Amino acid sequence: MKVPSLLRSLVSFSGMTFISRLLGLAREVAMSAAFGAGMVTDAFNVAFRIPNFLRRLFAEGSFSLAFVPVLTEVKEKESEEALRELVARTAGTLGAILLVVTAVGVIGADWVVRLFAAGAVDEPEKFDLTVNLLRVTFPFLLFVSLTALAGAVLNAYHRFALPALAPVILNLCWIAAALWWAPHFDVPIMAVGWAIFASGVLQLLFLLPALRRLNMLAWPKWGWSHPKVRRIRQVMLPTLFGSSVAQVNLLLDTLIASFLITGSQTWLGQSDRLLEFPLGLFGVALGTVILPSLSRHHVTTDAAGFSRALDWGLRTALLIALPAMLGLVLLAEPLVATLFLHGKFTAHDVAMAGMSLAALSFGLPAFVLIKVVAPAFYARGDTRTPVRAGVVAMAANMLLNLIFVALLFALWHRPEDLQAGWLAALAKVPGLHMALALASALAGYLNLAQLWHALAKAGVYQRQPGWARHLLRVGLACLVMSGVVLAGRHFAADWTTVPTLQRVLQLGAVIGTAGLAYLLALFAQGFRLRELRAS
C-alpha cells in the first residue's frame, strides 16, 4: 500500500480537527452565555477536567505512544490475523482496566473531588454539585479511550480523517445540552454532564464501521500476558507520567485554583480550551501523523528517513506555532470578548480570562514542539528520557506556581484582605490565576529544553539544510504580522462595549489581515509549499 505524504496526512487530520475545534469554540460560547462564570461552572470544570485528564493520559498520551509503535511493527512484519489478535487483546485488556478505574471513580467521586478541588470542601453546595457531576462524567473515560484505540488502528492504515472528526460528536451533544436540554433539568448544568456521557458512547460507535471495513473489528479478549500487550504495558507504565506532564500540571493548577477567587477555574478552563484550538489543530495533528512514520522508519532501520521526518515536523511546527502564539498573546482579550461576552459572562470575566489566555499562550511553541519531539523517543522505545524530563518540568511548575502566586498576591492584595488570614485573602484577590498559566508555559519550555538536549545527545537527528533561512523567514514574517495586529488593536473600538457583530467584524478583519500579511511576508522571502513535502 502506498504511504501518503506527511503533508497530505497532516492536512487530512487537521481539516477534520478544524471542524471539531470550531464546534469546540461554539460550545464554549454556549456555556458562557447559558451559565456565565461562577460556582456552577467552576464545579463543572473540575468534574470534566478529571476524566478529561485521564482521557488524554490514555487516549492522547501514554497509550497511543506505547500502542502505535507495536501496532506498526506487527502491521509491517506479521500477518493480518496477528494484527487483529493484537487489537482484540489490547481492547479487552484496556477496556477491563478502565472499567475498574471508572467504577472506582464513580463510587469514590467525593474523595476524588477532595483530592483535586480541596478548596471546594468548605463550600457544601459547590462540593456536592461537583461530586454529582463527576459521577455522571467519569464513564466518558472508558468509552473515549476505546475510541482512541480504534482511532490508532485507523491511523496505522493512514485513515486520519474519521478519528479527527469523532470529537465533533462531543461538541454537538454539549451545545445541544447547554442551549436546549438544560432548562428541562432541575439542576441545569447536569444536562451537560449527561451529554458528555452520551457522546463517549456515540464516538465509539461512530468508528466501529470503519474498523469493520478494514477487517480489524474483533471481539475484545483479556490479554494481560500476551507478548505484544506486555510490551505495550511495559512501555505505557513509565510514559503515563512522562507524556502527560502538561495535563498533570493542569490538574495541579485546578487544585490551587480552588483556593482562589470564584471564577478562577472557569477562566483557566476557557484559556486552556482556547489554546487547545491551535494545539489540537496542529500540535496533536503533527504528533499523530508523525508517530507512525517515525515508527515505520525505525522498524525498517531507515535512519535517514527517520531524521527527515522529524526535521519536517520541527519546521512545520515552528511555521505554525510561532505566529499562533503571537496572535493569541496580542489578541487574548479581544478573542475572549468576541467569543464569550454574552448572557451571564461579564466584562470582568473577559479581562480575567484574557489574562490567563495571554500567559498560557506564551508556552504554545513549547507545547507544539513537545508533540513532535516526544514521538522521536517513543518510536525508538525510549521511555526513560521523557519521564525524566517530565518529572523535572512538573516539579518546576509547582515551584513556579507558588512563586508567581505569591508575587502577584504581594503586588495586588489590599491590607484589609489579610484580616481573615492569608488563605481567605487568596480568595479575594482577582487575577492570581494568571500565575498558574504563566508557570505552565515556562514549565513547557523547560520540558522541551530537556528533550531537545537528549535528542542531540542521542545523535538520531541530523538537521537538514536550510534551517537558518527557515528561521529568518518565520521570524521576519512574525514581526510583520505582529505589527499588523498591534495596528488593528489600536484602531479598533473598545472590545467590551461595542455590539457583538462589530466585535466579530473587527476581530475577523484583524486576524484575516494579519494572517495574510504573515503569508505574504513568507512568500516574499522565497518560501514555497513544496518545502513542506515529506514522506
Image (tube, helix red, strand yellow):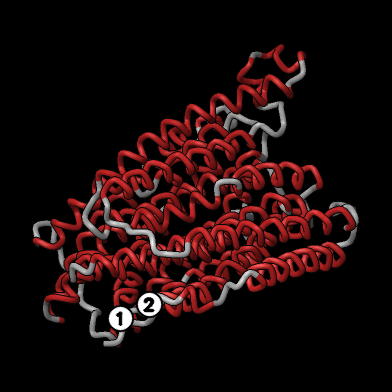
- Quick check: 324 left or right of 501? left
Residue 535 appears at what percent x and percent y?
36, 77
- Quick check: 304 left or right of 225? right
Going by the numbered disc 2, the residue's amino acid type is Leu
Residue 515 appears at what percent x and percent y?
70, 67
How much space separates mark 2 and mark 1, taking CA atoms?
Answer: 7 Å
Residue 99, can we see it? Answer: no
CB under 8 Å between discs 2 and 1: yes
Residue at figure coordinates x 23%, y 57% from the top left: 380
Marker disc for residue 211:
1
* Crowding near the residue tagged with mark 1, few <14, some 14–19, many ≥20 C-alpha atoms within 10 Å: some
Going by the numbered disc 1, the residue's amino acid type is Leu
The residue nearer to you, when weighing 483 against 339, is: 483
Marker disc for residue 81:
none
Q: On the image, which quarter does residue 200 sit in? A: bottom left
Residue at figure coordinates x 24%, y 52% from the top left: 236
The residue nearer to you, when weighing 445 against 524, is: 524
Q: Label 2: which residue?
A: 207
Residue at figure coordinates x 68%, y 14% from the top left: 420
Residue 123 appears at what percent x and percent y?
59, 31
* Crowding near the residue tagged with mark 2, few <14, some 14–19, many ≥20 C-alpha atoms within 10 Å: some
- Quick check: 68 left or right of 125? left
Residue at figure coordinates x 28%, y 44% from the top left: 385
